[in-house]
Amino acid sequence: MSQPGQPLSLFDVTARAMSAQLVRMNASASNLANAGNVAASKDAAYRPLRPVFAEELDRSSGLATVRVAGVYRSDAAPVQMHDPDHPLADANGDVWEAPVDENAELVEMMESARQYQNVVEAMQTAKQLMLETMRMK
């Protein structure tokens, strides 16, 4: 990675993009791991994680890159289910299931894996072009 104040290199940009995709994939993995979890109250129920990204422009190099602005809990409402025999059931016999859409999370995970691979391939191509350029001299 470049030092503060130095222009970003292509490798800095790709490293940040790969890092962002890993955060995205880890959030989906956490959501999938908690799918189907139930809690005794609405407030205690698991809420899916959602990463938020921001674009950053490096004025010295003119390159745009990404950074993780934060990872936040979704405001999706937990699913109330009536199950009086469940050990976590409240006085009304209700439990609260995590509002995780497993299909959407799998799509998110696959898309982030593809994007990660695209960045790796772009970095490998740039590296190969640099090596070919050095051989020409």
Image (cartoon, rainbow, N blue to C red):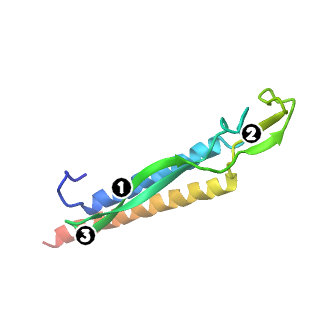
Where is 26 relative to 115, above or below? above
Q: CA distance from mark 3 to mark 1?
A: 16 Å
Q: Nearer the viewer, mark 2 or mark 3?
A: 2
SS assignment at label 1: helix
Q: Dot 3: few (<14), some (14–19), or many (≥20) neighbours within 10 Å?
A: few
Q: Is 78 situated left or right of 48 in this image?
A: right
Q: Tell me the tag on residue 16.
A: 1
Q: Tell me the tag on residue 62.
A: 3
Query: Cβ–Cβ below 8 Å for labels 1 and 2?
Result: no
Nearer to the camera, 125 or 8:
8
Q: Could you say where residue 125 lies in the image, as x and y percent from the top left?
A: 34, 67
What residue would you read off at disc 2?
Answer: 96
Q: CA distance from mark 1 to mark 2?
A: 37 Å
Amino acid tagged 2: Trp
- State the residue lying farthest toward the bottom: 136
SS assignment at label 3: loop
Q: Could you say where residue 13 lies in the image, as x and y percent from the top left?
A: 32, 60
